[in-house]
Image (cartoon, rainbow, N blue to C red):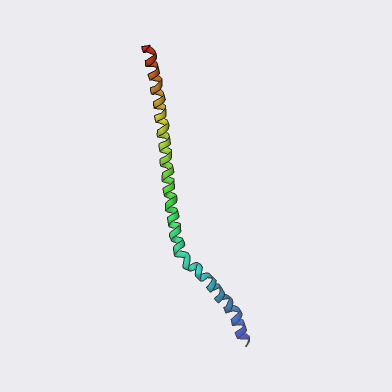
Amino acid sequence: MLTWIVLAVVLLPLVALALAVRPVLARLPRLRRAAVALQRRATEAEALRETAEALQQRAEGVQRQLDTTQRRLAVIKAKRG
């Protein structure tokens, strides 16, 4: 009789734990896919950030060229009268 009580005290919590863990284990493949997708999006976001920085630098360079051109144009107009 004591053996059955000990088995029940040991096995019932293990069965309850197994039943509680089962849904989590069933979700693991979806969680892995989600993690991979998240990593891919993070990589894409980093690439976009780098592209945006490069475009910002290019825009600043074009703005400097425009400023220089406008100053030169003003000098030319001033010389013509």
Q: Is 20 placed left or right of 64 in the picture?
A: right
Residue drawn at x 40%, y 22% is 70
> Percent from the top left, x then y, of residue 31?
46, 61
Who is closer to the viewer here, 20 or 73? 73
> Percent from the top left, x then y, of residue 75?
39, 16
Residue drawn at x 61%, y 82% is 6
Which residue reaches farthest front? 81
Task: Give the quadrant of residue 36.
Answer: bottom left
Quadrant housing the C terminus: top left
> Percent from the top left, x then y, of residue 28?
47, 64
Residue drawn at x 44%, y 46% is 46
Task: Give the quadrant of residue 59.
Answer: top left
Residue drawn at x 53%, y 73% is 19
Q: What is the count of numbered marks?
A: 0
Task: Give the quadrant of residue 80.
Answer: top left
Who is closer to the viewer here, 12 or 81? 81
Who is closer to the viewer here, 28 or 4? 28
Q: Is 9 placed left or right of 62 in the picture?
A: right
Which residue reaches farthest bottom? 1
> Percent from the top left, x then y, of residue 13?
58, 75
Quadrant housing the N terminus: bottom right
- When the figure is inspected, residue 49 is found, relative to residue 30, above or below; the finding is above
- When the figure is inspected, residue 12 is found, relative to residue 78, above or below; the finding is below
